Amino acid sequence: MGHHHHHGHDHGHAHVHDDGGNARRLVVVLVLTAVYMLAEAIGGWLSHSLALIADAGHMLSDVAALGLSLFAVWISRRPPTPARSYGYHRTEILAALANAATLIAISVWVCVEAYRRLHEPPEVAGRMVMAIAAGGFLINLAGMWVLSGGRASNLNIRGAWLHVATDALGNIGTVAAGAAVAYLGWMWADPAASVIIAALVCWSAWALLMESLDVLMEGTPSSIDPAKVRDALGTVIGVQAVHDLHIWSITSGRVSLSAHIAVDGTRPDRDILPELCSKLRENFGITHVTLQLESECAASEALHA
């Protein structure tokens, strides 16, 4: 009884164009961060500052995030193959997962090291720590500014921006620790700040972990309320009921929907279908749509006979 209609617009072109800008942003921030990360690591070693080393670890997490994001942008440009009908978009999500795991490992190491140092704090060169951390703060502000353009549209860029932003917070903590050591002689301030930075790293990693798992579990995107979608489809004249409604994301920002639509036969399917599609596009921004229209009247007559 059912009429099958497959309906999908490919909005690939806009996506690729957007990715070009995003890729350039990522490269700029990646180079800035990588260079300064080395400076912080060497500075941390010379000034005996765990806070600076933790900061460098945080920057390493940025570099990893940015590298993975760039990789994802590159791989998502590869055309889909029949065996991988969605292209390679899921790679981005798997990359985010790997990234989150690495970050959590770094944080744990920093906490263990800080615990060791609180018992026998080394002599920290406070002023040097302040200077290096302040430089890192400026680098991160620059990075946030570069990435802010692509943040709204892409989970990937948003993840990278979050990394850089939490890193800037970490820098502030490190500057404060350096000041406490230099002017107050509080040697414990340095390992204490490193623990706070590790907590920040963990926090951003956790968010990343949850978002990527949500995509992998085919969860309905948090920005879309399935009940509202169901109601909107039900308002189209000629629609009786909506069954088997599935909404999921292939990767961030690409939402797909499939549903069975029971129609009452008062209007031809070719009128109902475009109306359903434009409703989804205009109200929810969903363009990858597969709808199957089926008339229920025959089934109900058979039951009543």
Image (cartoon, grey):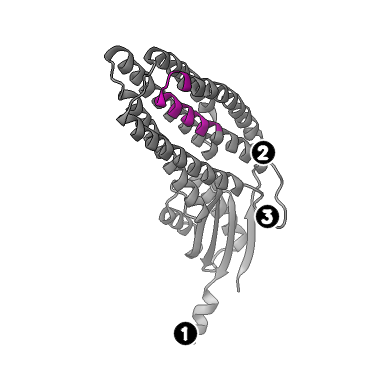
**Residue marked by disc 1:** 304
Local SS, label 3: loop
**Residue marked by disc 3:** 84
Amino acid type assigned to the residue bearing label 1 in the image: His
**Residue marked by disc 2:** 74
Q: Residue 202: where, in percent of width, then height?
A: 41, 39
Amino acid type assigned to the residue bearing label 3 in the image: Arg
* Upstream in sequence: badge 3 or badge 2: 2
Residue 222: assigned label: none
Local SS, label 1: helix
Q: Residue 8: where, in percent of width, then height?
A: 63, 52
Can I make out residue 293 in this image? yes
* Upstream in sequence: badge 3 or badge 1: 3
* Residue displayed at 38% across by 22% down: 174
Is residue 58 part of the magenta span, yes or no? yes
Q: Report the front residue among 17 and 159.
A: 159
Vertical relation: 304 (above or below) 30? below
Q: Report the front residue among 69 and 272.
A: 69
Which mark is nearer the camera, 1 or 2?
2
* Upstream in sequence: badge 1 or badge 2: 2
Q: CA distance from mark 3 to mark 2?
A: 16 Å
Label 2: few (<14), some or many (≥20) within 10 Å? some
Direction front: furthest residue: 120
Magenta span: 45-63
Is residue 243 part of the magenta span, yes or no? no
